[in-house]
Image (spheres, helix red, strand yellow):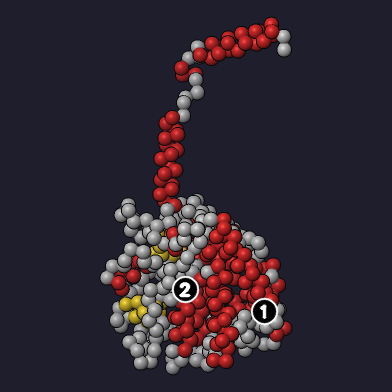
Amino acid sequence: RPRRGRRMLSSLRHRIALASSSTPLLARRPRPYRSIVVHHRAMAKADEAMTPGETAVADVSKDGAFVRKDAIFRNRITPDGPYTPESGRYHLYVSYACPWACRTLSLLHLKGLTQHVTVSSVHPTWQRTRPDDPDDKHAGWCFVGEDGTFISGPSGAGSFPGGPSHACSPDPLFGSTFIRDVYDRAMGGAAVGTRFTVPILWDKKTNTIVSNESSEIIRDLNSQFNAIAANKELDLYPEALRPAIDEVNEWVYHGINNGVYKCGFATSQGAYDAAVTELFSCLDRCEDILGKQRYIAGDVLTEADVRLFPTLVRFDEVYVVYFKTNKKFIHQYPNLWNYVKDVYQTPGMRHSVNMWHIKTHYFTSHPVLNANAIVPIGPDLNLDEPHDRDRFGAAK
């Protein structure tokens, strides 16, 4: 470019700069110092609300892998022990959203024990359980027993109804506000680090928790209450199939039941990759097995199906989006999808499925995973449509 042209351009830039500097103060764009400060304060508040606190969401290892804590109440129902099988003695605290709790609901209905064990269901949306303590970040299950009552998620987002019309009940035993209160009652004040989970099997006679381990509760409901069960002939853990059931339970628990949580709660790419690989390897294994027999452990419905089903029925509606298990939908597996419909349509099983509770819980309870508590609308699958499992013979 010629030297004269460069001088003219430089002079023009200089005049523009002078004109800009002489612009009245009110006409200038204000510096965003205050808005930046307000924005950072808002972000800090949001980060505080999204802190998982003393919940399972925080149970991750140094390499970002989710590590579930063991249940802490492991007493059993026995004819000759401190907790004997009696009508009206026990109460189940459950959430229709929780796959572990829904195992126990399935057993109650399958065995015909609903007249002998009372039940209460919490609201699906977690709440701050010590809202007046700024240092206590725990959020968990709460009771919302009155119709017309609405609550928001732990971060204050959303508005979700409770009460009996939405299958939410009060605590009929103690009028508790939170499931945490039930643990405090049983433990004389729960220790720091306690996970306030459902299901809870409560003994009304001794006023304490018998068990909060779903796998053992369903074993006891299956075998220890036959004297009063309406369907006493049904055995979901038959002796001849026990080796097969135990084997299936082992890899299904680690790879599928807990596997979806290992995907969703992972905080590193490596941990997620390992979990999702194991998950879909196990789903492929299920698909192969169910191409050869009607149920996952044989030709009859067993405990293994009761344990596998709750994860599968939540998979397409929740886990594919929320836990990032989007490699494949369950309804894209011909055998698995027909199996899910078959088990759901088994008398007694559908009582454990409340999709409003399921979707509301996951998408509104963990701000760190879904800050605005927005619940997706789909895919709204039809579990009552015909299945093809009769090709293996009538259900036994």
Whether residue 158 is visible to the viewer of this picture, yes or no, is: no
* Residue that badge 1 annotates: 289
Q: Secondary structure at mark 1?
A: helix
Q: Of helix, strand and loop, which one carries label 2?
A: helix
Give the image location of residue 229, x and y in percent. 46, 89
Q: CA distance from mark 1 to mark 2?
A: 26 Å
Does residue 64 appear to the left or right of 44 in the view shown? right
- On the image, which quarter does residue 79 sit in? bottom left
Crowding at mark 1 (Cα within 10 Å: few <14, some 14-19, many 20+): some
Q: Is residue 337 left or right of residue 58?
A: right
Residue 326 at least partly seen: yes
Outermost residue, front direction?
A: 63
Q: Where's residue 31, x and y in %?
A: 46, 26
The amino acid marked with disc number 1 is: Ile
Q: Residue at x 44, y 62 (%)?
A: 59
Label 2 sits on residue: 101
Name the residue at 58% across, 63% down. Answer: 274
Q: What x and y, as percent, mark residue 299?
A: 64, 87
On the rendered image, what quadrant is the C terminus found in?
bottom right
81 is higher (above) or lower (below) than 275: below
Direction top: furthest residue: 4
Question: On the rendered image, what quadrant is the N terminus found in?
Answer: top right
Q: Which residue is more in the foreground, 95 or 325?
A: 325
Number of other residues with Cα within 10 Å of mark 2, as a class: few under 14, some 14 to 19, many 20 or more: many
